[in-house]
Image: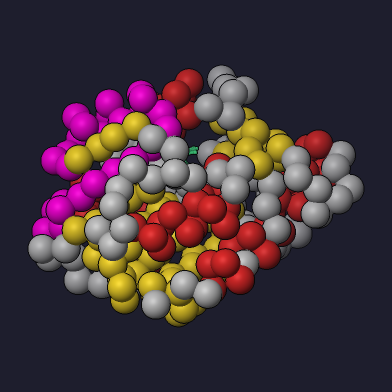
């Protein structure tokens, strides 16, 4: 079945199932970039059904998770021990300097204001804390918006149609440029320690057959 809403409430269970089976290698690599979590306070932004939160709890972290989808948060609460709340990543309901680690796995691209969401993650992180993120690559946005939406402009503020998990889920999410992730407002307050580009076909659709391009990127910032 192709689900057509860019709203994770509609397919919370299906997403949880597919993400568990199709993204394990990527998650393993992502986890290897995190500091030792024992006794640390960790915030997972766009935590979804709590797949990563469960791992962080098992590693000894005190986990908080925030997601805009009520259904995802209900699943997360059932999955593991943590403080899970419904909320918007553009406006985090936490005090300044609260967390030792902030993570976000494939969720930041859903924000309509990436610099604001990143600034929020940095604000709630303690000084020197790491903020570690997997997000959609702007090159993928460009190709998907060209092929799926006939959009000709990399810079246009627009929704991008994309298909994930062997085309079983259709998404419509804001498009972003690389500048959104490397804006001066973000790099003023943090140091970029890791920047990686990766390809995750077939979890992401290869919209131009044969063309190999980056579909996701990993960013690790250290709060200054
Ligand atoms: C691709 S899923 C990733 C979920 C989870 N991190 C995982 O890896 O399973 C993106 C998540 O971002 C959430 N989301 C979308 N917009 C959001 C927003 N403005 N604030 C917080 N969460 C949001 C969605 O509800 C969804 O759970």
Count of numbered tags: 0
Q: Is residue 151 left or right of residue 14?
A: right
Q: Can the viewer see residue 20?
A: no
Q: Is residue 45 left or right of residue 185?
A: left
Q: Is residue 67 left or right of residue 199?
A: left
Residue at image x 24%, y 46%?
A: 64
Q: Quadrant of residue 129?
A: bottom left
Residue placed most toward the observer, 22 or 169: 169
The figure's colour scheme reads secondary structure
Region rendered in magenta: 57-82
- Residue 66 magenta: yes
- Residue 174: x, y in percent? 66, 42
- Residue 172: x, y in percent? 65, 33
Residue placed most toward the observer, 93 or 4: 93
Q: Quadrant of ligand 1?
A: top left
Residue at image x 19%, y 29%?
A: 78
Q: Can the viewer see residue 94?
A: yes
Q: Is residue 105 above or below residue 93?
A: below
Q: Is residue 9 left or right of residue 36?
A: right
User: Which quadrant holds the C terminus?
Assistant: bottom left
Residue at image x 44%, y 24%?
A: 9
Q: In the orientation shown, which residue stands out farthest toward the front? A: 96
Residue at image x 44%, y 60%?
A: 133
- Residue 53: x, y in percent? 25, 47
């Amino acid at each position: 079945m192709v689900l057509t809403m860019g709203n994770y409430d509609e397919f919370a269970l299906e997403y949880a199932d597919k993400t568990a089976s199709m993204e394990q290698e990527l998650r393993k690599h992502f986890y290897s970039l995190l500091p030792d979590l024992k006794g640390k306070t960790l915030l997972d932004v766009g935590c979804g059904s709590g797949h990563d939160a469960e791992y962080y709890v098992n590693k000894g972290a005190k986990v908080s998770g925030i997601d805009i989808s009520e259904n995802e948060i209900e699943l997360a609460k059932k999955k593991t021990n943590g403080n899970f709340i419904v909320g918007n990543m553009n406006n985090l309901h936490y005090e300044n300097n609260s967390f030792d680690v902030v993570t976000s796995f494939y969720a930041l691209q859903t924000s309509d204001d990436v610099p604001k969401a990143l600034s929020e993650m940095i604000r709630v992180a303690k000084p020197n804390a790491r903020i570690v993120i997997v997000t959609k690559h702007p090159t993928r946005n460009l190709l998907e918006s060209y092929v799926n939406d006939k959009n000709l402009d990399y810079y246009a503020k627009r929704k991008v149609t994309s298909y994930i998990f062997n085309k079983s889920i259709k998404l419509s999410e804001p498009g972003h440029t690389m500048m959104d992730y490397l804006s001066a407002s973000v790099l003023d307050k943090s140091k970029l320690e890791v920047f990686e580009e990766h390809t995750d076909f077939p979890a992401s659709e290869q919209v131009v057959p044969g063309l190999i391009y980056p579909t996701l990127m990993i960013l690790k910032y250290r709060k200054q």
